[in-house]
Image (spheres, rainbow, N blue to C red):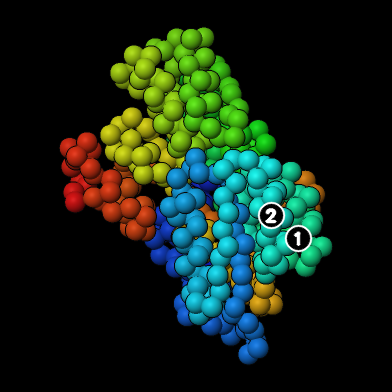
Amino acid sequence: MNPCTSRTTRTRRTTLVTVGLTALSLLSLSACGALGDTDGSSDSASPSERNDITVGLLLPDKDAARYEKFDRPLIEERVGVLTGKEGRVVYANAGGSTAEQSRQFGRMIADEVDVILVNAVDSEAVGSDVKKAKAAGIPVIAYDRLAEGPIDAYVSHDNELVGEVQGRAIVDELGGEGEKGKVVVMNGAPGDPNAALFKKGAFNELNGNVDMVKTYDTEKWRPEVAKANMEKAIDAVGADNVDAVYSANDSMAGAVIEALEEAGVSDLPPVTGQDADLEAVQRIVGGTQHMTVYKSFLLAAGGAAEIAVARVQGRDIQFDSLTGDRVDSATRKDIPTMLIPVVALTRDNIKDTVIRDDVYDVKDICTAEYRAACASIGLTP
């Protein structure tokens, strides 16, 4: 399948996971003729378009390592390329606070930025800020999490598919035969619509195939909350009776594994994750975490920058070509959307994912602690 064609919001696991490795390896930000030339030029751009634009970037927290390490610098770099280094990114991180993000949003509106990229702490709460931006004539692009309000576009992944990939990894690992395995479920934040989609996708796979003995939602995705909930699950179920843990992301997976180890579990059950954090990739190499969902930061961040710049510069043809999918929020239907493929990252495909895409170098992963484990799967600095 050509990843430049037939992109729909409900593309299922068998399609996207099949093309995932190919798409992430072969797609560049100028793939499909939609993302413009690498020097920022475009046939659809008018001769009078301005490049001295300001992109406001609002990210939600610092708990997930990806935001500071990948999303922010990649967006900054791509905006620079697209605008001949005349454009700039004004950045703010809410530190997990809805109130702080609202204040940051207000400052960007007051400073009259040209467009706002927002990854919402709380997708419902941010809706009023989106309305204020639109009233001020500032377009808003929801990034990673679908925000409420009159957003212009949305850039993310098929988040239900993410949960399906995670759930299927557990079902496949447990074998699906005989007595159902006991699985502890560690969902994300209840106020995050992405978490609801991860949960829905995971439950599509887990329901009927495993025994979900304990299920938790995790306030603001905080690892310490996940650890406390895992400790409760261990007390209720018994450390030796946990056959697998569905963890919605990597930071929580690390906390879950810590709780299991502190409870004396030496033969750890399979634990899922998401985001391909470096520590998670190392845990996968070392055998303490079963898998993570790898989502190309390059494609997502670059795509968000492309969409934001195209919207400000009035390049509607390019904007439309970038947002070929459609999703609905609680407040708006048929939102123009770009969806990025996802891949289940395991010990078997580290070379073909985060290393091939230059997310990490082998030496980043294979530190002294993991050198022997790396060598056993053919990773050598």
Query: Residue 209: x, y in percent?
Result: 53, 24
Task: Please give left or right for residue 317 compared with residue 72 in the image.
Answer: right
Give the residue type at disc 2.
Phe
| In this rendering, position of residue 297 left or right of residue 5 | left
Q: Element at badge 2?
A: helix
Look at mark 2 in the image and give the residue it sits on.
105
Looking at the picture, tell me which residue is in the foreground, 87 or 296.
87
What residue is pinned by disc 1? 133
Q: Earlier in the sequence, mark 2 or mark 1?
A: 2
- The residue that appears at 69% across and 42% down in the rendered structure is 99
- Image height check: is 223 above or below 358? above
Secondary structure, mark 1, is: helix
Give whichever of 133, 109 is nearer the camera: 109
Residue displayed at 79% across by 56% down: 131
Q: Position of residue 109 (x, y in %)?
A: 72, 61
Q: Residue 193 lies in what quarter of the image?
A: top right
Q: Is residue 225 above or below residue 15?
A: above
